[in-house]
């Protein structure tokens, strides 16, 4: 999937045509951005707004983002923005290219879960695998520190009430935070592993009789 993503990227230099400041992006050591899906479009919007308003703080930037995505005729970008937690929004604004890689890791984790289990479950072993895979891939793509920041931000949501499986949202949050951490440990120890190799390592870890991964439903 990583190869496909690279093939589906546009060189940031193209944005110079619309006044994009290439020097600002060079500081991030990344010269390409995926724009073949709604998340890529959201990141493009954020980067363009930041480049045109370098004097504005994050709160002002967020206001401009909300204004622009709300004016779009397609709802995909708006839905993605609104699905982010408040903490995630702050991180996406601060680290847009890293956020793009976080989304790439999420897509990899979802795909590998479907390959290994045939579905993406809630609160079960497949859920534990998916979170572990997501965090391990994030470590490889953006490093352990930022991986933890984005993973923790994703769990910063309302925990009142129950999930559809009958367990409390708090139980699910605690499960996810734990499995996120386990995934990052595996990612740190296997930084040169391919996606398939990493998926096999995590799959075996989840099924180990002494596994550190946890789940709520069998």
Image: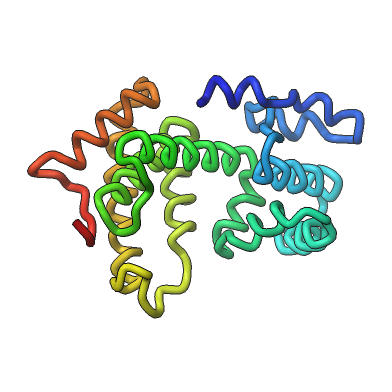
Q: How many marks?
A: 0
Residue in the picture at 29% in, 68% down: 171
Image location (x, y in percent) of residue 41: 73, 43
Give the residue furthest to the front.
118
Image location (x, y in percent) of residue 193: 35, 22
Image location (x, y in percent) of residue 213: 21, 48
In screen coordinates, is 26 left or right of 136? right
Which one is nearer the viewer's eye here, 25 or 160? 160
Residue in the picture at 25% in, 30% down: 201
Give the residue furthest to the bottom.
161
Q: Is residue 3 visible?
A: yes
Residue in the picture at 36% in, 76% down: 162
Which one is nearer the viewer's eye here, 191 or 201? 201
Placement of 170 over or under 31, stated as above or below: below
Give the residue furthest to the left.
209
Q: Quadrant of residue 47?
A: top right
Q: Quadrant of residue 44?
A: top right
Which one is nearer the viewer's eye here, 51 or 66? 66
In screen coordinates, is 16 left or right of 191? right
Placement of 125 over or under 185, stated as above or below: below
Viewport quadrant of the C terminus: bottom left
Placement of 197 over or under 99, stated as above or below: above
Q: Is residue 57 visible?
A: no
Image location (x, y in percent) of residue 60: 77, 62
Q: How is the image coloured?
A: rainbow
Residue in the picture at 65% in, 45% down: 39
């Amino acid at each position: 999937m990583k190869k496909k993503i690279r093939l589906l990227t546009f060189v940031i230099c193209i944005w110079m045509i619309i006044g994009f400041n290439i020097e600002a992006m060079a500081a991030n050591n990344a010269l390409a951005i995926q724009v073949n899906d709604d998340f890529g479009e959201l990141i493009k919007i954020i980067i363009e707004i930041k480049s045109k308003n370098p004097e504005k703080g994050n709160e002002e930037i967020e206001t401009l983002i909300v204004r622009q995505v709300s004016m779009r005729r397609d709802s995909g970008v708006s839905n993605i923005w609104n699905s982010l937690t408040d903490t995630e929004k702050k991180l996406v604004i601060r680290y847009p290219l890293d956020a793009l890689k976080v989304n790439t890791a999420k897509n990899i984790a979802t795909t590998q879960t479907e390959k290994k289990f045939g579905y993406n479950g809630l609160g079960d072993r497949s859920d534990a695998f998916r979170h572990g895979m997501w965090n391990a891939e994030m470590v490889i793509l953006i490093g352990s520190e930022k991986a933890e920041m984005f993973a923790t931000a994703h769990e910063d949501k309302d925990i009142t009430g129950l999930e559809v499986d009958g367990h409390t949202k708090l139980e699910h949050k605690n499960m996810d935070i734990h499995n996120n951490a386990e995934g990052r440990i595996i990612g740190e120890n296997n930084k040169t592993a391919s996606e398939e190799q990493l998926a096999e390592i995590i799959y075996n870890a989840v099924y180990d009789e002494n596994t550190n991964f946890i789940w709520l439903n069998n």
